[in-house]
Image (cartoon, grey):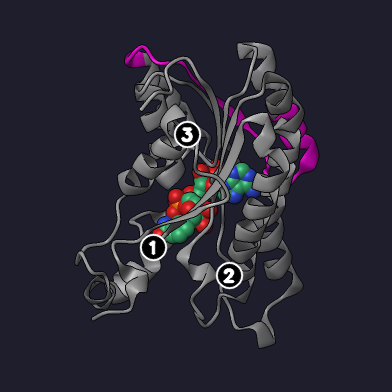
């Protein structure tokens, strides 16, 4: 996959799927900046490990839900490396609970972090990508956008919103050689899914056609493809990476 010399920005790169995307893009020749909110120790470790391999990776602290932070972060990347080719909107949270008793804070936090951040960062990179007539935007959705999971009204709304935003933005910027796609991961082994895994890993595996949970690498490899020159004729697409979970077979 050709991403040699590209400049990438990944939100939520300190842990989990985002961290693996940072490592995958950097190991394929991109300069990679990533955003973290609170995991400074993990973020510093990612940067140090990548530097040991001779790769250019930098960590920037910020809250993706904050528009001013998004503008500041994008400006810092462009000032440092002169361009921005790839944006991966990966940062996300869950605050599960039944709608009947969901506090406004749980609704707002999930919508602004998961969906608001995509607006914030897409808009922040737009002028740069349009002027350079090149861009690859990858938004992290979820199979939860399609499932009727109890307790996930806020999360499903945010991830469904990302899919709609992805399709609309793809039509707005395609003529500028900017593609916009989403990935819908299934059940991936990260901190986010630890509690559910502990409670029901065996049951979940039975529902996955390939009979295993996903690894961050499964998502990072899909992101690498969508970030590469080779995916130039794919836009407005939601790539499901779930081992067959949503096929519904048992
Ligand atoms: P994770 O392990 O919990 O990591 C979340 C990452 O997002 C961390 O790097 C975290 O930074 C960052 N983050 C969260 N809120 C932020 C904020 N306000 N500002 C800046 N950074 C923030 O999650 P994951 O499982 O890797 O999930 C990554 C993405 O994939 C999410 O969008 C998630 O919804 C989606 N997804 C995951 C699965 C799955 O099975 N794991 C399935 C479908 C979709 P800090 O460490 O600094 O807090």
| Residue at the spot of label 2 | 156
Q: Secondary structure at mark 2?
A: helix
Q: Secondary structure at mark 3?
A: helix
Outermost residue on the left side: it is: 211
In the rendered structure, which disc, 2 or 1, sits on the residue that comes first in sequence?
A: 2
Foreground pick, 117 / 36: 117
| Residue at the spot of label 3 | 227
Q: Quadrant of the N terminus?
A: top left
Q: Nearer the viewer, mark 1 or mark 3?
A: 3
Q: Nearer the viewer, mark 3 or mark 2?
A: 3
Q: Residue at x 65, y 83 (%)?
A: 99
State which quadrant residue 66 falls in.
Answer: top right
Instruction: Give how far apart the Cα atoms at labels 2 and 1 are.
Output: 13 Å
Q: Kindly tell me whether residue 154 is visible in this rendering.
A: yes
Outermost residue on the right side: it is: 68
Q: Which residues are magenta?
A: 52-73
Q: Does the numbered disc 1 mark a residue whose Cβ is under 8 Å from ligand 1?
A: yes
Q: Residue at x 26, y 70 (%)?
A: 208
Q: Residues within 10 Å of mark 2 (few under 14, many from 20)?
A: many
Is residue 16 shown left or right of residue 96?
Answer: left
In the rendered structure, which disc, 1 or 3, sits on the residue that comes first in sequence?
A: 1
The circle drawn on residue 186 is 1
């Amino acid at each position: 996959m050709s991403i040699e010399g590209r400049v990438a920005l990944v939100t939520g790169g300190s842990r989990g799927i985002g961290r693996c995307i940072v490592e995958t893009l950097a190991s394929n020749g991109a300069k990679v900046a990533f955003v973290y909110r609170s995991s400074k120790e993990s973020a510093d470790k990612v940067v140090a490990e990548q530097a040991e391999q001779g790769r250019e990776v930098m960590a920037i602290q910020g809250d993706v839900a904050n528009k001013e932070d998004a503008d500041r972060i994008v400006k810092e990347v462009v000032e440092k490396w002169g361009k921005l080719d790839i944006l991966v909107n990966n940062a996300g949270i869950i605050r599960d609970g039944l709608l009947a008793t969901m506090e406004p804070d749980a609704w707002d936090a999930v919508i602004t972090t998961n969906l608001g951040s995509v607006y914030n960062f897409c808009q922040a990179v737009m002028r740069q990508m349009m002027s350079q007539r090149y861009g690859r935007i990858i938004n992290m959705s979820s199979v939860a956008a399609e499932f009727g999971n109890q307790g996930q009204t806020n999360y499903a709304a945010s991830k469904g919103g990302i899919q709609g935003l992805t399709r609309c933005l793809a039509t707005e910027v395609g003529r500028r050689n900017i593609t916009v796609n989403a990935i819908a991961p299934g059940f991936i082994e990260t901190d986010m899914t630890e509690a559910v895994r502990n409670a029901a890993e065996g049951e979940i595996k039975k529902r996955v056609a390939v009979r295993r949970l996903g690894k961050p690498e499964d998502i990072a490899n899909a992101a690498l493809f969508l970030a590469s020159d080779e995916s130039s004729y794919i836009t407005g697409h939601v790539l499901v990476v779930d081992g067959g979970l949503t096929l519904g077979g048992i």
